[in-house]
Image (cartoon, rainbow, N blue to C red):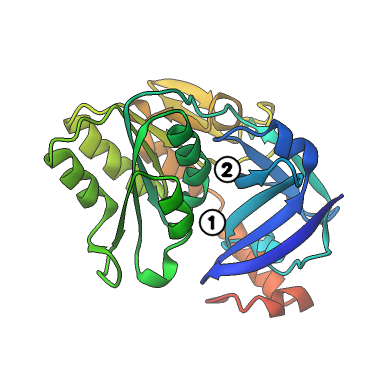
């Protein structure tokens, strides 16, 4: 079992926990993820590792509360133990000196972008980071991103903080000022990544996106994480989670992500009625 050393809320609906997991901390590379179960009857969920400390033997997880398990995880405190933690899984990010790398992170996507940005800067790249959210209160990890970026641009859709507009508009302005960009890494909601690819394709900037398909085993056996890339079926868990953004079928990914929305809502409504679920103040409810 894996002890939670600290747990906190970092914005509405987003939590961070530091977990004791020395072997995973040692083996993990940027871009890789873990799969956890909170308790022995719990479902398996994939989460990216937002940070690690090899000396302390810890990993940091940042997640958004969206379903039963992520809400349940949010009720766990320092001293509680996770049933299982499996990882690191997936392929590491291809890190080398490209030249200028632009990282684009939307919402919770900033968490997995952070270790990649750090590694890209350590590899000698000039790193421009663009992070955004709908509104100021939903921005996460901006100070952490500032420390690992040569330039940090922050935007909010409603203009409540930083540049007023979408991350794609900020990206376009960086391209328009004539910066030669050798690689773009985009992580966030699927519509955001699709919009980023539209901008970078027009400017001929190679773009990597990190996909978040539904996963079960995380080891290439169940097929639930199927995505289509360059007309071929690939498995997000073992072939990714990063892929060439120009090749991804985003429409299919969105359809597959919506497949279990009905059962997920039923499960969340049932959880809401449990003692633990009552602690979560889950918005909405059964219609
Ligand atoms: S999660 Fe089962 S094959 Fe990828």
Q: Is residue 201 above or below residue 22?
A: above
Name the residue at 27% across, 64% down. Answer: 162
Residue 149 in the image, given as x and y percentages of width and height: 39, 45
**Label 2 residue near ligand 1, CB within 8 Å:** yes
Q: Is residue 23 left or right of residue 175?
A: right
Q: Nearer the viewer, residue 106 or 214?
A: 106
Q: Which residue is mark 1?
A: 261
Q: Is residue 266 left or right of residue 137?
A: right
Which element type, helix, strand or loop, lies under badge 2?
A: loop
Residue 276 in the image, given as x and y percentages of width and height: 76, 74
Q: Is residue 153 left or right of residue 235?
A: left
Q: Is residue 22 above or below residue 261?
A: above
- Residue 114 can be seen, yes or no: yes
- Residue 211 can be seen, yes or no: no
Disc nearer the start of the sequence (1/2): 2
Q: Nearer the viewer, residue 19 or 213?
A: 19
Name the residue at 67% across, 41% down. Answer: 34
Q: Which residue is mark 2?
A: 214
**Label 1 residue near ligand 1, CB within 8 Å:** no
Between circles 1 and 2, the one closer to the viewer is 2
Residue 203 in the image, given as x and y percentages of width and height: 17, 31
- Quarter of image, ligand 1: top right
Residue 113 in the image, given as x and y percentages of width and height: 47, 44
Neighbour tally class for label 1: few under 14, some 14-19, many 20 plus, Cα within 10 Å: few
Residues at marks 1 and 2, CA–CA distance in whole angstroms: 11 Å
Name the residue at 42% across, 25% down. Answer: 229
Where, by quadrant of the figure, is residue 154 drawn?
A: bottom left
Which element type, helix, strand or loop, lies under badge 1?
A: helix
């Amino acid at each position: 079992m894996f002890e939670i050393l600290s747990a906190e809320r970092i914005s509405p609906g987003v939590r961070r926990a530091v977990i004791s997991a020395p072997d995973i901390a040692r083996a993990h590379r940027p871009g890789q993820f873990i799969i956890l179960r909170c308790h022995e009857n719990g479902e398996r969920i994939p989460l990216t590792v937002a940070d690690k400390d090899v000396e302390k033997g810890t990993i940091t997880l940042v997640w958004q509360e969206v379903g039963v398990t992520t809400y349940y995880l949010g009720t766990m405190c320092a001293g509680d133990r996770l049933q299982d933690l499996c990882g690191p899984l997936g392929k590491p990010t291809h890190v080398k000196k490209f030249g200028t790398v632009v990282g684009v992170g939307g919402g919770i996507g900033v968490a997995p972008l952070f270790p990649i940005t750090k590694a890209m800067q350590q590899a000698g790249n000039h790193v421009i980071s663009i992070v955004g959210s709908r509104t100021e209160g939903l921005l996460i990890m901006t100070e952490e991103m500032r420390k690992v970026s040569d330039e940090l641009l922050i935007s909010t859709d409603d203009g409540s903080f930083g540049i007023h507009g979408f991350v794609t508009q900020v990206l376009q302005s960086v391209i328009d000022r004539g910066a030669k960009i050798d690689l773009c890494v985009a992580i966030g909601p699927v519509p955001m990544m699709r919009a980023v690819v539209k901008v970078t394709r027009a400017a001929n900037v190679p773009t990597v996106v990190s996909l978040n398909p539904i996963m079960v085993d995380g080891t290439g056996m169940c097929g639930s994480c199927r995505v289509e890339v360059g007309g071929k079926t690939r498995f997000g868990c073992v072939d990714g989670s990063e892929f060439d953004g120009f090749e991804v079928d985003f429409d299919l990914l969105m359809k597959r992500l919506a497949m279990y929305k009905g059962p997920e809502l039923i499960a969340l409504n049932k959880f809401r009625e449990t003692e633990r679920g009552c602690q979560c103040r889950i918005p909405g409810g059964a219609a």
